[in-house]
Amino acid sequence: MSTIVSPILRILSYFANLRFSNSLSGSKGNISVHYDLPEELFSGFLSWDMTYSCAIFDDSAGGHTGDLTSKRLIAPPRLGSYVEPEERFINTKAGMDDLERGQMQKLHLMIKKARIKQGSKVLEIGCGWGSFAILATKHYGAIVDTLTISESQRVATEENFRAAGVSHLARVHLMDYRDMPQEWKASFDAVISIGVTEHVGAEYLDTWFRQISWAMKPENSFKVFTMTTVPDSRWEQFKSEVDFFRKYIYPGAMLGSVKTLVDSITAVGLNIESIEDISTHYTRTAREWGYRFELNWDSHIKPAFKRHDPELSDEALEIFRRKWRYYFAYCEGGFALRCIYDHLFVTTREVSPSLDREYILISHMHSTMSLDTNTME
């Protein structure tokens, strides 16, 4: 029986995937399904910086198992727009918890790998709630243009930029990556995307990297990105099926494999500098999100849904809750069992020796700094 049913299910999965197309119009709809949910949902499980991607936990946070071996510190949910860590502690006693430290560690690492410095012109595709752009402008002096196709994220990010005092250095655009203006051609020192390539779709991967290459300066420019991947050996089967993740959480999402990404990257003339496996950190990140989701459901998340839609029944909310609990467990288990991976890619144009010497110096300086210094809290 299974030999008959399996091909039928695969055909149905194929047509379901077509329904989630990442064309210009389809992408906006797919993103809206997830990211235009009430902001209180996300502030209920993310750290105060509102970074929605894999954190990197250093030894000060106990590494990728620190939450299992020591007492967890969980800050209360963020309310409103960006607040400086120093002001936040004075007003709410909410200092950085381990998840926020891990997110800051990841953002600093990506900035370092992209050689971002004072005056660097940076394109970020996928703004989230602005945490990367705020750090890159406020602490490194970069100039950032960041893109989103979520109207609610655009509004929230603009407010966060104003609250952080970086509106003169960071601009958010409601724009698809395929619609970048002609004057952006070959104008960016670095292009950053954090957990965004999953939303591109397999059929648009070549277009994605071609657009990124188009925007990068012809010399000494970098593309740094993270992406959840599946093993190369399962890629062909995976892309023809619809799993829980794509059906219920991220319509239109498509995980790549390292080989498919390398093929698309090199096809547009970019060089691969490094590929780093950070999957074990995503196991803890998903677990941390799950803790917070449960902790804040009754007091923060559920009331927000009721305010946004008073007609929502308790039954509908409980279905939503169970679906998201499963989402966090699904991610934690997938990364722990190595069914899925998360990779940090660094790709480049040709790099001059002088820039590499500068990078080595900057790397040494950052390696001697701790995120526990007074500049961070």
Image (cartoon, rainbow, N blue to C red):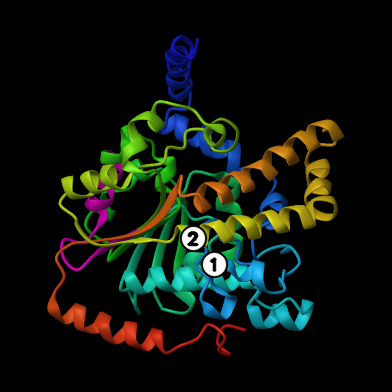
The dot on residue 64 is 1
Q: In this orientation, which residue lies closer to the viewer: 362 or 275?
A: 275
Q: Is residue 54 visible?
A: no
Residue that sits furthest to the front in the current view:
1
Q: In this orientation, which residue lies closer to the viewer: 155 or 343?
A: 343
Mark 1 near mark 2, Cβ–Cβ under 8 Å?
Answer: yes
Q: In this orientation, which residue lies closer to the viewer: 101 or 30?
A: 101
x and y percentages locating residue 374 in the rendered image: 58, 90
x and y percentages locating residue 122 in the rendered image: 35, 64
- Disc 1 is placed on an element classified as helix
Task: Name the residue located 39 percent from the left edge and 85 percent from the top edge.
Answer: 367
Q: In this orientation, which residue lies closer to the viewer: 28 or 105?
A: 105
How many C-alpha atoms fall within 10 Å of the one at disc 1: few (<14), some, or many (≥20)? many
Task: Name the residue located 46 percent from the left edge and 65 percent from the top edge.
Answer: 170
Task: Name the residue located 36 percent from the left edge and 42 percent from the top edge.
Answer: 256
x and y percentages locating residue 76 in the rendered image: 76, 67
Amino acid type, callout 1: His
Q: Which residue is mark 2?
A: 280
Q: Earlier in the sequence, mark 1 or mark 2?
A: 1
Q: Which residues are magenta?
A: 207-224
Task: Give above or below for 81 relative to 363.
Answer: above
